[in-house]
Image (cartoon, helix red, strand yellow):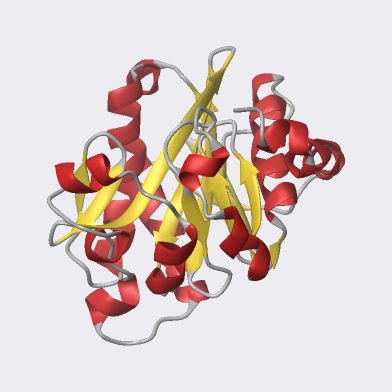
Amino acid sequence: MRLRVVMDLEGAPVSWSMGMDEAMLELRLQDRIPDTLRLYVIKPSAVTIGYFQKVEESVDLGYASSRGIDVTRRISGGGSVYHDASGEVTYGIVLPARGVFSDVRESYEAICRGLVESLRILGVDAAFAPVNDIVVNGRKISGSAQARRKGFLLQHGTMMYATDLDEASRVLRAPQAKLQAKGVRSIRERVVTLREALQRDIDKRDVAEAMVKGFAKALGAEVFLDEYREDELKLAEELSLKYRSSEWVFKR
């Protein structure tokens, strides 16, 4: 496998970021771009909720508004996520849903192995926790979600290297039943950052570079660095309008 890598660590608003992820999926299925891994930062900090979630049940909208935290809905499933502009590298990967990637569970494990390898490179012993989490000593350090379209998949997710977990706890509304099932009482107990695991500060570029190496190893891929293409930039801009619209955000 040859895997194109785009590194965009300066940061862009969540509406544009989600627009680019969807643009990549659409252009990949049209065979206008190759298999691609994108590493990016959402800036300013924001919340994304899963496609099937209800906004009011997933986010404290009053708190988000008071803090200038944008909220949008993803095309992928899963739960609500706080994306810290100063503490998270987000990834998105688009691939054909063939072979191991045709099965949802197996594809999560295969792709998430890239995150496990990345963390090992950085000095952290991590493990895949089905269906879509990476844990360190039982605490979540990364979560992922998928969308599938016409035989292709987009998987995107988090790498929390220095996320403000107290802020995440204030803006997200985690269902108590889900927390209890994990044997914890709060988001803060459930989640850990790379900085906490390493007990030292770490730079986002070091994290991103380890992620490139980790995905290359896990997928057996030959990687090459690239920039955004005109098709992607144009479509991402068009799609970002959807992710800013109340109709989309509050559709459930």
Quadrant in which residue 236 is drawn: top right
Residue that appears at 83% across and 40% down: 241
- Quadrant where the image shows the C terminus: top right
Q: Is residue 156 visible?
A: no
For the residue pair 219 and 235, the one nearer the viewer reads as 235
**Callout count:** 0
* In this picture, residue 29 sits left or right of residue 190: right
* In this picture, residue 180 sits left or right of residue 76: left
Quadrant in which residue 22 is drawn: top right
Q: Residue furthest front?
A: 62
Measured as percent of width and height from the top left, residue 222 is found at 47, 45
Measured as percent of width and height from the top left, residue 116 is found at 27, 53
Residue that appears at 64% across and 40% down: 21
* In this picture, residue 124 sits left or right of residue 13: left
For the residue pair 170 and 128, the one nearer the viewer reads as 170
Q: Is residue 36 visible?
A: yes
Measured as percent of width and height from the top left, residue 126 is found at 20, 58
Residue that appears at 68% across and 67% down: 68
Where is 50 relative to 99, above or below? Answer: below
Residue that appears at 46% across and 70% down: 167
Quadrant in which residue 181 is drawn: top left
For the residue pair 10 and 228, the one nearer the viewer reads as 10
Where is 194 relative to 56, above or below? Answer: below
Q: Residue furthest bottom?
A: 200
For the residue pair 178 and 18, the one nearer the viewer reads as 178
Measured as percent of width and height from the top left, residue 169 is found at 39, 64
